Amino acid sequence: MIRKDNSFAQKAKELLFNLFYMYLLLFVATIVLKLVDYYVQNQFNFSFYETIFNKQKMKLSNSSIFRILFIVPLLEELIFRLPLSLKKMHMPFISLLFVIFLIHKPSDVYNFRLLIKLILIILLLGSLIYKFFDQQILVIISTKFYPYYFYTFCISFGLMHLLNFYRSVPVSLIVIAPLFVVPQIITGYFISYIRLRNGFFWGLVFHCICNMLAVYLFDS
């Protein structure tokens, strides 16, 4: 695990540099995926980019900006980045995975009864995980398998974004759908790197900035 104590200014500078490198890499990935999408569109009369764009526009119109820019990044950071530190006290946050599957609509966030149930589920599962989770497992992961652990979270973060559009993909093309979440896997890697290097807060800031730029892109 990489962790380096720097000043606030140094951390902010590092965040900006990594944003630049990430978007440079995303630019290259987008060119490649555009070529793939062009071929798919000519052969199968289906466009992944058009589908993803329409789904994202619809999602933006049905969600509040506050939820997209702050609530969603916070939940995703708790699920995919907080456990990267391999601290036993952080493991209960894995139970937040259930929140993703229980909240199907943005309006559910304002459903008080549902939120109370979710909080109780999180507290219950979190307590059970903390009580019975063996610290030795974390030691083994950190010493022998950490790179696999790290990249599993990066890839899982990207694959989660398949939920945004996979239902609209023809069955014959579903096998190549994961290619179109490669940008999210790349983004997940950079957020994870910043999180490990400078702390959870800076990973969250990085994530919020990414979402803000994405909102601007899809809303323009």
Image: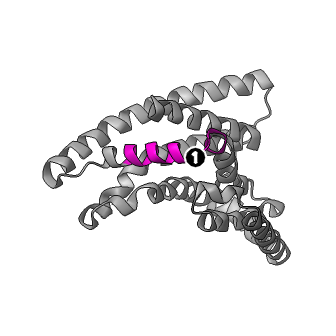
Magenta residues, as a range? Answer: 52-68
Amino acid bearing label 1? Ser
* Residue 69, position as x, y percentages in the image: 63, 39
Q: Which residue is mark 1?
A: 63
Quarter of the image where one finds residue 200 = top right
Residue drawn at (74%, 53%) of the image: 85
Label 1: how many Cα within 10 Å (few below 14, some 14–19, many 20+): few
* Residue 119, position as x, y percentages in the image: 79, 65
Q: Main secondary structure of the magenta part?
A: helix
Question: Does the magenta segment cover residue 149?
Answer: no
Residue drawn at (70%, 48%) of the image: 74
* Residue 31, position as x, y percentages in the image: 31, 35
* Residue 45 in the figure: left or right of residue 6: left
Residue drawn at (69%, 41%) of the image: 204
* Residue 198, position as x, y percentages in the image: 74, 37
Vertical order, 61 against 106 (above or below): above
Q: Which is more toward the observer, 143 or 109?
A: 109
Q: Is any part of residue 139 visible from this angle?
A: no
Q: Which is more toward the observer, 151 or 200?
A: 200
Residue positioned most to the left: 43
